Image (cartoon, rainbow, N blue to C red):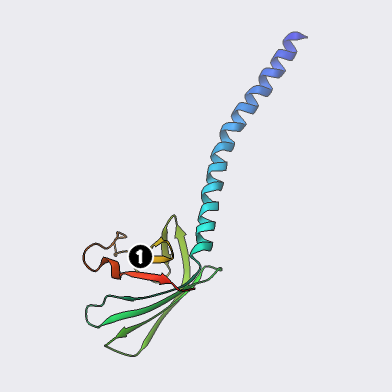
Amino acid sequence: MRKLTLYLFSAVLLVFVFSCINNKTKVNQLIGSEGNVLKGMGVVGTYEGKLPCADCTTISTVLSLDNNKNYHMRYVYVGKSEEVFEHKGKWELDNDILSLEHIDYNFKISDDQLQQLDLSGKEIKGDLAEKYVLVKIK
């Protein structure tokens, strides 16, 4: 009888140990995805800025991000044309990087602002770096 009890106890202990190891991974994945959702909620809003332009004065830009992961970007090449250009689509968040469908570049999220990244996904450096920013207005 003692041997049977010892075998049952050992089997239960083994099952418990292996189930704990597997659950730890799942909990970490859940926490990571939950963090992205919370960041996504914090990024929702409207941003604006005057981005540098090679052949115009500035690019006046307004970007709106909604709770349904839709975006609407409007921009005007100031000093070149009065035409308003628009892009619409879905946005995605990966850690602190915001990606917009149909847009070639991404943005890095920081406190109430979006910093435009270069086409390779790196931060823009140099004298004009601070001008590649959209500030949250609402």
Question: Which quadrant of the figure has residue 108?
Answer: bottom left
> What residue occupies the far top of the structure in this picture?
2
Across and down, in percent, residue 10 comes to: 66, 18
Report the residue marked by disc 1: 115
Asked whether 81 or 129 is in front, the reply is 129
Across and down, in percent, residue 119 comes to: 29, 65
Asked whether 129 or 103 is in front, the reply is 129
What residue lies at 47% left-to-right and 67% top-to-bottom? 91
Across and down, in percent, residue 135 comes to: 40, 70
What residue lies at 26% left-to-right and 66% top-to-bottom? 129
| Label 1 secondary element | strand
| 55 horizontally vs 4: left or right | left
The three-letter code of the residue at mark 1 reads Gln
| 63 horizontally vs 34: left or right | left
Q: In this view, does 83 lie above or below 118?
A: below
> What residue occupies the far right of the structure in this picture?
1
What residue lies at 53% left-to-right and 62% top-to-bottom? 41
Question: Which quadrant of the figure has residue 57?
Answer: bottom left
Asked whether 47 or 34 is in front, the reply is 47
Question: Which quadrant of the figure has residue 75?
Answer: bottom left
Number of numbered tags placed on the structure image: 1
Q: In which quarter of the image is the N terminus?
A: top right
What residue lies at 63% left-to-right and 23% top-to-bottom? 14
